[in-house]
Image: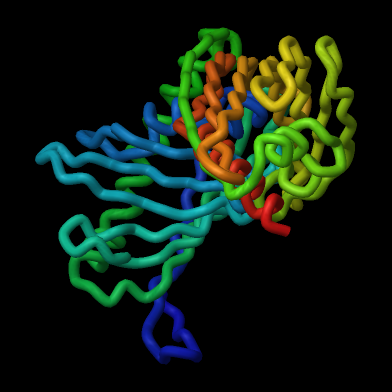
Amino acid sequence: MNRIDDASRKVQPAPLRVSRVFSAPRETVFKAWSSADHIKRWFCPDGYSVPEARVEMRAGGAFEVCMRSPEGVDHWTKGTFTEVVAPERLAIDHHVIDPCGGGPLFSALTEVAFIDDGGSRTLMEVVQSYSFPGAAQAEQMLKGAPEGWRQTLDKLEAEIARMQAHGGGGRSVVHGAFHLERTYDATAHEVYKALSDEAAKGRWFYGPQGWRPIERFMDFRVGGRERVKGGFEGGVTTTFDAIYHDIVPRERIVYTYEMRLDDRKISVSLATLQIKPAGERRTKLLVDEQGAFLDGYDDAGSRERGTGDLLDKLGASLKS
């Protein structure tokens, strides 16, 4: 049965409800939603594939999936996680994009509950609520949603079996590298201070919207350590632990760092920062990183984007 939206007075499709019992602990079922690497293996119906995905499993993090049809047409779902409580529940607010026009066909809120069904079994319940589609193509897609979810959950069942066969996800390492540059209206001394002074760095080196600091310290010297720990409203914590290996004042900083989500180590990286004059009161900062992403964590470019955002915050701090 459909419902009426008081604001638009349009008939809204009734929420879709699907469930499945998996022969796996809920931590494993929850983890199958946690990275692009997993999502690419199961988040589509029969005949489709997922060539691209971006999954940042935290409140406010991106959830973007490209489902490619047998005819080669790409169908994008783009949204964000609005709630992440591991391993109990998550919610995703997203839009299904028209492959022809590029605009949204309809919007949906997908809420997923993971219920312990005896330790080695998990009941997963999905409730998907839709806004009014307003397009014949969207109406047809919604009619096929129950069967599409059934086929998708069949694939999820196969992915969970694969994860268990590899020890709950398996041990793996994926390598990545990127190079970024920024030119600032500041002297080399000012840029170096923003990178090396704890108070100055605290004005720009922090997490995205919704992130709150928990712990911060900085011992800037060769062999010194730095830690920045914070948390999101959904309860997930991030920890940056660094060791400085090479420092040439106003010219070069080299350090390694580990990143953790909660207690899970997700990456180990080597970062090189080079400071170069670029004219009168202008300085170029060159950043190179090589990272090892661990045990199923799929970076999907988020580290590069996050570093770019930090460098923009650094630039803003130099103007204040």
The residue closer to the viewer here, 74 or 311, is 311
The residue closer to the viewer here, 75 or 143, is 75
Q: In which quadrant of the rendered image does the N terminus lie?
A: bottom left
Image point (89%, 37%), residue name: 215
Image point (57%, 24%), residue name: 23
Q: Is residue 33 visible?
A: no
Residue at the left extreme of this rendering: 71
Image point (78%, 31%), residue name: 196
Total count of labels: 0
Residue at the front extreme of this rendering: 280
Specify whether 316 is left or right of 72: right
Q: Is residue 168 above or below residue 210?
A: above
The residue closer to the viewer here, 142 or 96, is 96
Q: Is residue 189 above or below residue 146?
A: above
The residue closer to the viewer here, 185 or 50, is 185
Q: In which quadrant of the rendered image does the C terminus lie?
A: bottom right
Image point (33%, 35%), residue name: 52
Q: Is residue 185 above or below residue 129?
A: above
Residue 311 position, x and y percent, is: 60, 42
Residue 70 position, x and y percent, is: 14, 37
Specify whether 298 is left or right of 136: right
Q: Is residue 68 visible?
A: yes
Q: Quadrant of residue 184?
A: top right
Q: Quadrant of residue 143?
A: bottom left
Residue 78 position, x and y percent, is: 40, 53
